[in-house]
Image: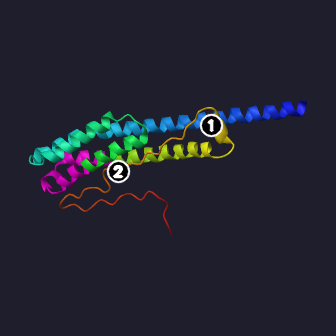
Amino acid sequence: MIPVLILAGLVLLYIALTYNNLARLRQHVREAWSGIDTELRRRYDLIPNLVETVRAYVQHEGEVFARIAEARARALASVGPPDEQARDENALVAALREVLAVAEGYPEIKADQHFLKLQKQLELTEDRIQAARRLYNANVRDLNTRLAVFPSNLVGHLFGFKPEPFFEVEPAVREPLQVAGLPPQVPAHRGPKTP
């Protein structure tokens, strides 16, 4: 009888430990998502100022400005799961790239200090979004792996844990704009140096 009680105790201990681990991983995913959400909101706040700065120089690009306003509104209203929000974010990124492409064609915009400041803030925000996205996706990977492997998948299923979707979104700014007369900026090397 004692071996049966010991075995039952070990099974219950395993279930409790696995449940706590899955709950902790789920909280890490939620926390990481809040980091992405914060950075996305920062981007949403920058976009109107950037658009207005470009619009001050270029009045005839109304269609581009309308597309970004619509895409921003959709992204702001998007509250679904991360994979659905990623679709709206990618539409916003595409519209933002159009605005930046318009700015590329006008040297006076690229020389405007207010535009340059907004551009730099956007680049920094994009870096933070990508860092938050990597953290979120790493946490999702860890949770989803635990939910896929035996025997923790049994505990996850028993308590209703579900796999989380990854968040894949393109950065709006891939490389800094070049200002006429200034040398291009070289992005900082972020990985380990190779010999």
Give the mark toward the camera: 2 or 1.
1
> What residue sits right under mark 1 in the picture?
156
Residue with the most extreme right position:
1
Q: Is residue 114 magenta?
A: yes
Q: Nearer the viewer, residue 2 or 44?
A: 2
Left/right of residue 138 with respect to residue 148 in the rendered view: left
The amino acid on which the numbered mark 1 sits, given as a three-letter code, is Gly
In the rendered image, the vertical position of residue 45 relative to residue 106, given as above or below = above
Secondary structure state at the residue bearing disc 2: loop
Report the span colored magenta. Answer: 96-123
Residue with the most extreme bottom position:
195
Q: x, y percentage for residue 31? A: 49, 35
Residue at the (52%, 47%) spot, across then down: 138
In the rendered image, the vertical position of residue 99 relative to residue 74, given as above or below = below
> What residue sits right under mark 2 in the picture?
171
Secondary structure state at the residue bearing disc 1: helix
Left/right of residue 6 with respect to residue 102 in the rendered view: right
Residue with the most extreme left position:
60
Residue at the (48%, 43%) spot, across then down: 165
Answer whether residue 52 is visible to the viewer in this image.
Answer: yes
Of callouts 2 and 1, which one flags the residue occurring earlier in the amino acid sequence?
A: 1
What crowding class fits label 2: few (fewer than 14 Cα within 10 Å), some (14-19), or many (20 or more)? Answer: some
Mark 2–mark 1 Cα distance, whole angstroms, equals 34 Å
